[in-house]
Every structure is written in structure tokens, then in C-alpha cells.
Amino acid sequence: MATSTASTKSSNKGTKLSVFSWEGKDRNARIVRGEMSAAGENQVRATLRRQGIYATKIKKNRIKAGKKIKGRDIAIFTRQLATMMRAGVPLLQAFDIVGRGNPNPSVTKLLANIRADVETGTSLSGAFRKYPLYFDNLYCNLVEAGEAAGILEDLLDRLATYMEKVEAIKSKVKSALMYPVAVIVVAAVVLTVIMLWVIPAFKEVFMNFGAELPAPTLIVMGISDFVVQWFWLIAIVLGAGSYFLLQAWRRNEKFQIFVDKMMLNLPVFGELVEMSSVARWTRTLSTMFAAGVPLVESLDAVGGAAGNYKFKKATDDIQKEVATGTALTAAMGNTNAFPSMVLQMAAIGEESGSLDHMLSKAADYYESEVDTKVEGLSSLMEPIIIVVLGTLIGGIVVSMYLPIFKLGQVV
């Protein structure tokens, strides 16, 4: 039994395509099956007929709700596409294979749409540019450079390596920040339960003692009474505040700048955020420069890839100076945003004509520093969090048990 995959062109550029599963017989009366993206069932039959296949069964596939497409999904797709092309698989067939094998229906639909655009004559970079939410300027520029130079598989391979390293850096920074956030959330839930239910139960018992309660107990009970009485208001304020902060971070540029500056000034995590930004900045510029993209054009995508306003602004300043003839290292030094080691390695790269190689080495160094920093932070945060939570919750427990020690005086 043979399996075949066919696809078709959309007669209208704006036509919505669906995926159909089909079964039929070829010229040798063998049963063949496959899937096809088409505007309708009639288009599937017509396309199969041109291929010498008589369709006996055609069924429109149900569209499953997919998960959100993340950077990691695009990195995996890029690596798979690069591998397929290196193996000599035609581009359209590679899209079919990668799309069918992806567990996320959202990715499958995205790849089907891109494939349809490419099949109608759009360049691969042009098809990617239609989806800026998933493929940024850096990605599209590298693909366009690969198409122009005839080395698309090499550029896709380089792009996949770049994305994998950037995603690894993001994952490590998130894991370092996630642990304390998770513990703080759990602690907040525990404290809420204690304030709403545990302390009021103790309060009823203490009211029958007839003895004067210690000051710590009175303070904790007062806080509990406030939380019980105004819990609905506290919940609304916290929920609304979190929502508006999130929306401000997404939509308000000034607030984003404020958050970026605050992240760099954090006492423990600031250095980690800066190291990861430097690693991503140098890795991005190295990848763009090695692909043959001119330096001034490369800097267009580098600033945003660093993920922090400080380096975005520094990149804009560097681009202006480089465009007027200033050397890259001198322009970088004028921003006061980069460590001296990065400046020295960039200077050596400019002098020796191996700027991409030296920037790549700098990125390797700072990525390894991020690894070391994350491990150190994990071991440092555990005892700090334990001490803080132990003091907080332990203090509440002790304050509530102090009146019990006076039971002898009451009796």
C-alpha cells in the first residue's frame, strides 16, 4: 500500500485553505492515501485527477484547538527544515513532513499556510514576513540572505543554532526567577489560609480565657480581622492591579522601559539579566554578520533581540555612529553599556577580520556565565527563602501559642 501526499495552489490569494484526507487508486490500480491543503473538495479531486489518481474517498480534517506557538516551536521547526534541506528533500515536501509530524495543531496550520504561499510563487522569506508574530526581522533577513546567496540550508542551520542558544538562555533565566516566585505564591496562599480560617478559630478559644493576651497575639489577630473583613476588596485590588500592570507592560513603552531598568538594578538577579542580554546581543550580531548581512542592517535586528531597553538604546546609538563611519568597537565603547571583555574581543575581531567569530566566542563565554550564575542563585536562594518563610510563619505560630502558656495563670 503506497502513501502519497499532494497539495494544490489556491486560485485566489485570499482563499482560506483546509486540510483534506483522501484515498484513491493510481494508474496501476494501487490504493494510495494522503493529505492535501485545498480550498474545497472539488479542488482536491481536480488536483488528484491531474496526477492520475482516481479519488474514492475525501474527508475534511477537523481543526483541533492548538496551543500557543512559542519560540521553542519555531526553533524546532527551523532545525527540522534545515535538516530536511541538507538531506536533499524538496522545500514543499519538507514543509509537509515537518507539519504532519508536529504535535501542536497551531504550528501545523501555520506551516500549511506558509507552504501554500510558497507554492503560489512567494519567496520563503516573503512568506515568513506575513507572520511577524512568529518570524522577526532577524529571521526573515537571514532567510532572504540565504535565498539570495543560494545557501539557504546553511543559513537555516545557523539560524536554528542561534535560536536554540537564545531559547536556552531564556529558559535558564526564567528558571532562576521562577523558583522564588513559586515559593512566594505558595507562601501567600498559606498565609491567606492562616489569616482567614486558622487565626479566627484560635481567637474564639482565646476569648474564653479571661486573661490579657500578649501584644504579638493581638497584632496578629488584628491583621486577621482586617483580612477577613476586607478580603473581597484586597482580592479585587490585587487582581485588578496585576491585570493593569500586565497590560501596561505589554502596551506602554514607558512602563516597559521602567521594568527593564528595574530588572537590571535588582540586587541578586540584575547581573544575571545583564549577562543574558549581553549573550543574546553578541550572539545575534555574530549570526547576522556571519550570514553576510551588512553591519548597519544587522544592527536593526540586534537591539530588540537583546531583550532589554538599555541595549536597544545602545544599539540605536551604535547604528547611528557606525553609519557615519565610526568603528564598531568605538561606538560600543561610547554607550558604556558593554563589559570591557566584549569591547576587547570586538576590537580584536575588527582588526583580524573575524568579528563574527570573536563575537560568537564572547556569546559562548557569557552563556556559560549565565549557567554558573543560575546554579549559584539556586543554591543561594533556597536558604534565604527558608529563613524568611520560617521567620514569618513561625512568628505567627508562636504568637498564637503564647496565650496557651498563660493557661496556668487563668486556672
Image (cartoon, rainbow, N blue to C red):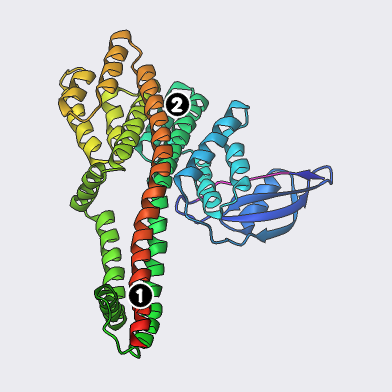
Quarter of the picture holding the C terminus? bottom left
Tell me: 76 left or right of 58.
left
Depth check: give the residue in front, 286 or 388: 388
Find residue 42 and report its horizontal and vertical position in percent: 63, 57
Tell me: 85 left or right of 139.
right
Q: Residue at x 32, y 8 (%)?
A: 352
Within 10 angstroms of label 2, few (less than 14), some, or many (20 or more) residues? Answer: some
Residue type marked 1: Met
Residue type marked 2: Gly
Q: Which residue is drawn at 53% across and 43% down?
A: 115
Of all residues, the one furthest to the top in this rendering is: 352
Quarter of the picture holding the N terminus? top right
Determine the image quadrant of residue 216.
bottom left
Q: Residue at x 72, y 44 (%)?
A: 4
Find residue 289 and report its horizontal and vertical position in percent: 35, 22
Of all residues, the one furthest to the right in this rendering is: 29
Depth check: give the residue in front, 263 or 402: 402
Tell me: 184 left or right of 122.
left
Which secondary structure lies at badge 1? Answer: helix
- The reply to whether residue 82 is in sight is yes
Magenta span of residues: 4-11
Q: Residue at x 28, y 55 (%)?
A: 250
> Which circle marks residue 90 in the picture?
none
Find residue 133 and report its horizontal and vertical position in percent: 38, 48
* Residue beneath disc 1: 400
- The reply to whether residue 117 is in sight is no
Residue 61 part of the magenta-drawn span? no
Depth check: give the residue in front, 224 or 70: 224
* Residue beneath disc 2: 146
Tell me: 162 left or right of 391.
right
Determine the image quadrant of residue 338.
top left
Q: Earlier in the sequence, mark 2 or mark 1?
A: 2
